[in-house]
């Protein structure tokens, strides 16, 4: 009896997760790191918890790329990240609207001392989406910009 319960519950849980992309873990290899995107806008929702923090931001139809983006000083990270190249290569997404951006695990968020944004705040990210921006409007954050502060989220601070 107990075995039947486990057998029947497992597929049901798998199917429930099938239609919930925000529960899925997306490794770095899932994203096109050759095309960094600049995603800036108002915060619509925040999930500040493990396994990864997520923010939903609304990228406006008239969004523009900041003129000084390429000249921002990328913070030193423990991992090998060419921040200057990433920032200089960022472009606006083809699609505008609500983007879910996935941040790092909470231990790294705390190491960088990233403040939790609130609904209505303005934030920006340089992030990677799927190849050709196909599928859901979802991106993994390389750099998060809150106010005048740039946070590198690939690895811990150097």
Image (cartoon, rainbow, N blue to C red):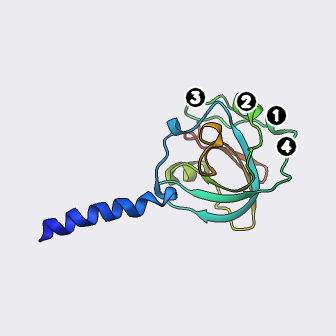
Name the N-terminal-most of marks 1 and 3: 1
Please say if 70 is above or below 49: above
Q: Secondary structure at mark 3?
A: loop
How far across and how far down the image is residue 14, in percent? 35, 59
Alpha carbon of mark 4 to alpha carbon of mark 2: how far? 15 Å
- Crowding at mark 3 (Cα within 10 Å: few <14, some 14-19, many 20+): few
| Residue at far bottom of view | 1
Q: Nearer the viewer, mark 4 or mark 2?
A: 4
Name the N-terminal-most of marks 1 and 2: 1
- Where the N terminus falls, by quadrant? bottom left
Residue found at x 79% / y 37% = 72
Question: Is residue 52 left or right of 153 when viewed as pictured?
Answer: left
- Where the C terminus falls, by quadrant? top right
Name the N-terminal-most of marks 4 and 2: 4
Q: Which mark is residue 71?
A: 1
How far across and how far down the image is residue 21, in percent? 50, 56
Residue found at x 75% / y 52% = 96
**Image quadrant of residue 152?**
top right
Please say if 24 is above or below 27: below
Q: Secondary structure at mark 2?
A: helix
**Image quadrant of residue 133?**
top right
Q: Check disc 4 and report the residue beneath it.
A: 66
Q: Which mark is residue 152?
A: none
Name the N-terminal-most of marks 4 and 3: 4
Q: Check disc 2 and report the residue beneath it.
A: 84
How far across and how far down the image is residue 74, in percent? 71, 36
Image marks 1 and 2: residues in contact by CB distance under 8 Å: no
Q: Which mark is residue 80?
A: 3
């Amino acid at each position: 009896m107990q075995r039947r319960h486990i057998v029947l519950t497992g597929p049901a849980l798998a199917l429930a997760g099938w239609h919930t992309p925000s529960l899925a873990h997306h490794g770095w290899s899932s994203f096109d790191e050759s095309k960094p995107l600049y995603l800036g806008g108002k915060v619509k929702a925040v999930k500040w918890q493990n396994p990864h923090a997520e923010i939903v931001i609304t990228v406006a139809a008239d969004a523009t790329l900041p003129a000084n983006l390429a000249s921002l000083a990328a913070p030193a990270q423990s991992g090998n990240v060419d921040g200057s190249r990433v920032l200089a290569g960022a472009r606006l997404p083809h699609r505008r609207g609500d983007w879910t951006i996935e941040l790092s695990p909470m231990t790294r968020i705390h190491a960088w001392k990233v403040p939790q944004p609130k609904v209505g705040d303005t934030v920006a990210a340089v992030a990677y989406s799927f190849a050709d921006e196909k599928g859901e409007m979802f991106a993994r954050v390389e750099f998060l910009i809150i106010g005048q502060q740039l946070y590198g989220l690939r690895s811990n601070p150097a």
